[in-house]
Amino acid sequence: MQTLEVQLGERSYPIFIGESLLAQPDCLLPWIRGRQVLLVSNATVAPLYAAQILKILRDAGLAVADVTLPDGEQFKDWQHLNLIFDALLAARFSRKVTLIALGGGVVGDMTGFAAACYQRGVDFIQIPTTLLSQVDSSVGGKTGINHPLGKNMIGAFQQPRAVLADTSVLRSLPERELSAGLAEVIKYGLIRDLPFLAWLEEHMEGLMARDPALLAEAIRRSCQNKAEVVAADELEQNDVRALLNLGHTFGHAIETGMGYGSWLHGEAVGTGMLMAADLSWREGWLSAADVARVRALLVRAGLPVLPPAGLSADEFLRHMAVDKKNVDGRLRLVLLRSLGDAWVTDTASPQHLRATLEAGAALGMMA
Ligand code: NAD
Ligand code: GLY
């Protein structure tokens, strides 16, 4: 097992990465401060992994309840968030309750948001079960739900007490979800860790084959990058944390425009990163060879590299206008000055942006 720490003063917390962590009571129990626990999962993950966690909790003599949400991004909303509050209140759980999120980013974001709101804030623990949630969403305390007009628009910062990334659960992950997670892994290489990008280029086939040692190393290196960024800018106030949004403004437009759950978040981010690279090339910062390098790695990770044909440039722009990075109505984008060096800018030319949005199939061909 490897341990990293997210350094946030008195709210610092560990990230444990390793095989079969879910079977080990010592990984979980020390992070529970009270006697009450609500396990939140979904209809896919709960049948696979909830029983062993519930047993550990009950064997420790804790008062335990659980709630199973429907599975899907389209349920990341107020109505289904309320199911968590229903379960907490039905069990008469107090401010000393600990919520445990067992699932991917959807369960993690919703459980964290419920923890931020319930009785004005209670403890929660992240047990991420997708690659995407192990390398990104479980770390850093961004929690929330979607609004029909914008992705992740309602939420709160609420740091977990601990993150348990059990690599053995990735064996049951569908291939498409593995690829979606790799998009966020590639992101760290593109925004701030060029040697990691080269490492990913060396090992992509092994990662796709789920080599346990390679996956553990990819998760460790991703979490290390994320922990450093979060420690530097926890509340995304100085454009350091915003770099983690490479490809997300394009990607959120795809997710919202196509309807939540149609494109996976990681797929939309992967294509969005190529669009950001394309725009960075049009702005004169990246070479065509750099864009080709990004595209080739995304393809090897099994990710789509063409934006949906059904989404027009005007629709993209309408959705991109609803973005948390925008200031006073000005679109701000994370772009690449070079591979491994991202920045947030509002200087991209509108003509270049439109050219990227209209490139469509040419986006895949250009490089
Ligand atoms: P997800 O939570 O929808 O999980 C993907 C699918 O995999 C689901 O069907 C899920 O039931 C299934 N699944 C999960 N673990 C499994 C396992 N071990 N075996 C088999 N199936 C399993 O999607 P995701 O990609 O994990 O997360 C995407 C969400 O995370 C989006 O809502 C996105 O906005 C959010 N996100 C948040 C942050 C953050 O910082 N908070 C960062 C990135 C993404
Ligand atoms: N996933 C973006 C962030 O955590 O800031």
Image (spheres, grey):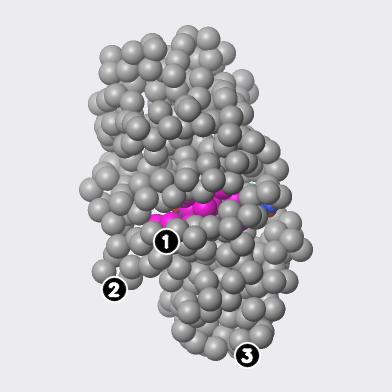
Q: Position of residue 320 (x, y in %)?
A: 44, 34
Q: Is residue 148 above or below residue 281?
A: below
Residue under circle 2?
A: 10
Q: Residue furthest right?
A: 47
Residue under circle 1?
A: 3
Is label 1 in a helix, a strand or a loop?
strand
Q: Amino acid at mark 2?
A: Glu
Q: Position of residue 136 (x, y in %)?
A: 46, 49
Q: Magenta residues, as a range?
A: 128-141
**CB atoms at circles 1 and 2 under 8 Å apart?**
no
Q: Is residue 279 above or below residue 234?
A: above
Q: Is residue 69 visible?
A: no
Q: Residue at x 45, y 23 (%)?
A: 294
Numbered mark located on residue 61 in the image: 3
Q: Position of residue 185 (x, y in %)?
A: 47, 40
- For label 3, being within 8 Å of ligand 1 is answered no
Closer to viewer: mark 1 or mark 3 = 1
Q: Residue at x 52, y 82 (%)?
A: 97
Q: Residue at x 69, y 71 (%)?
A: 52
Q: Residue at x 64, y 78 (%)?
A: 56
Q: Is residue 96 visible?
A: yes
Q: Is residue 137 magenta?
A: yes
